[in-house]
Image (spheres, rainbow, N blue to C red):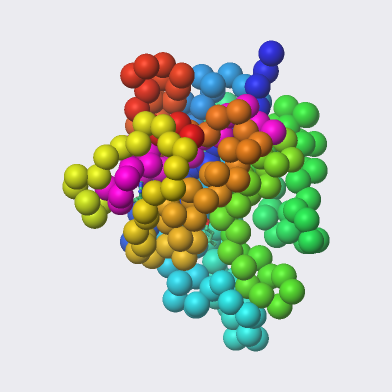
Amino acid sequence: MLTLILVKIGGSVITDKNLYRRFREDSCKKIIRVLPSLNDDLIVTHGAGSFGHIIAKRSGFPRKFKKEDVHDYSIIHRDVLDLNDMVAGIMLEEGFSPLSIPTQSIYRNRSPDLSDFQKYMSLGFTPVGMGDVILRSGIVKIISADDLLVALSAAFKPNLVIFLTDVDGIYDNDPKTFSDAKLLKSIDRNIAFSHVMNDVTGGMKSKYEKILKIRKHAGEVVVVNGNKPERLNDIGKKDFIGTVI
Ligand code: ADP
Ligand code: IPE
C-alpha cells in the first residue's frame, strides 16, 4: 500500500541564511536524489531561507500592510519564486514531475484551499509548496513551509512528515550556541529554544510548536539533517540519526 509522505526542505539547508539569495544547489540535489527511495506518494515543500527572511526582517514583516510595503513584498515573492524554480528544476532533472502550488492562491480565503495538492498528486505529479508572504485582512503575513505542513497534515493525514534542517534533529538546546547540547532521539515534552538570527518565523521554537500540531494528524514526524539526507533510509531502524516525535 502506498503511504503519504510530506517533506519540508528547510531554507537553512538549501540556502545560506546569512547571504541574500545564496542557493545551495548541491545540497538541494543531494536531498532530491534521496526522495525516490521513499517510494510513496509525496508532497514536497521548501522554506525560503535567505530568499525570504532577510528582506522580511528588514521590512518588519509580518505586520499591518502599509502602501510603501508593496515593493519589498514584490521582491520577496519574486525571490521565493526564483528559489522554487531552482528546486523544481532539480526535481525535473532527477525524474520527478513537480507541480508548484502558489502559496498566494492557497490562502485566498479564510481556510486554506489545498485542493490543488490533492488534484495534482492524484494525477501523478509531485506537488510542491513553498514559504511565501501573503496579504490578507490588511496584514502582510509570512506563511512558512511549516505552516503549509500543518494545514496539509490536518487535511491529508500523512503517514510520515519529514523536516530536513541544518542540524541533526531537535536538541535540548540550540546546538549552534551550546556545544554540549544533546540530540533528542525521541521527544514528547517541552524544551527550551533560543532565538535564531535572521529568522522571522521563530526558528526551532515555532517549528516545534507546529510539529506538535502536525503530530496529531500524522503517523510519525521526524527531524533529520538535510545535509545528510541518506539518513532518511534509516527511519525506523535502530541506528537512525535524527529526532522522532
Ligand atoms: P529550517 O530553515 O531548516 O526550517 P530553522 O533555521 O528555522 O530551520 O531552524 C533550524 C535552526 O534552529 C538550527 O540551525 C538551530 O541552530 C536552531 N535551533 C534552535 N534551538 C534548537 C534546538 N533545540 N534543536 C535544534 N535546533 C535548534
Ligand atoms: C519563510 O518560509 C517564508 C518567508 C520568509 C517569505 P520558511 O519559514 O518555511 O523558511 P525557512 O525554512 O525557515 O527558511
Assign the magenta stretch its main secondary structure: loop
Residue at x 55%, y 30% (from the top left corner):
220
- Residue 169 locus on image (x, y percent): 37, 38
Q: Residue furthest left?
A: 179
Image quadrant in which you'd find residue 157: top right
Which quarter of the figure is the N terminus placed in? top right
Magenta includes 168?
A: yes
Residue at x 80%, y 61% (from the top left corner):
109
The answer to which of 18 and 245 lies nearer the viewer is 245
Numbered range of the magenta stretch: 157-175
Residue at x 58%, y 77% (from the top left corner):
63
- Residue 221 locus on image (x, y percent): 53, 34
Q: How many marks?
A: 0
The answer to which of 24 and 110 lies nearer the viewer is 110
Q: Is residue 42 above or below residue 89?
A: above
Q: Residue furthest front?
A: 189
Image quadrant in which you'd find residue 117: top right
- Residue 233 locus on image (x, y percent): 44, 20
Res 240 visible? yes
- Residue 222 locus on image (x, y percent): 48, 33
Q: Is residue 106 above or below residue 67?
A: above
Compared across the picture, whether 27 is left or right of 111 comes to left
Compared across the picture, whether 95 is left or right of 198 comes to right
Residue at x 54%, y 73% (from the top left corner):
61
Magenta includes 212?
A: no
Compared across the picture, whether 94 is left or right of 42 comes to left
Res 93 visible? no
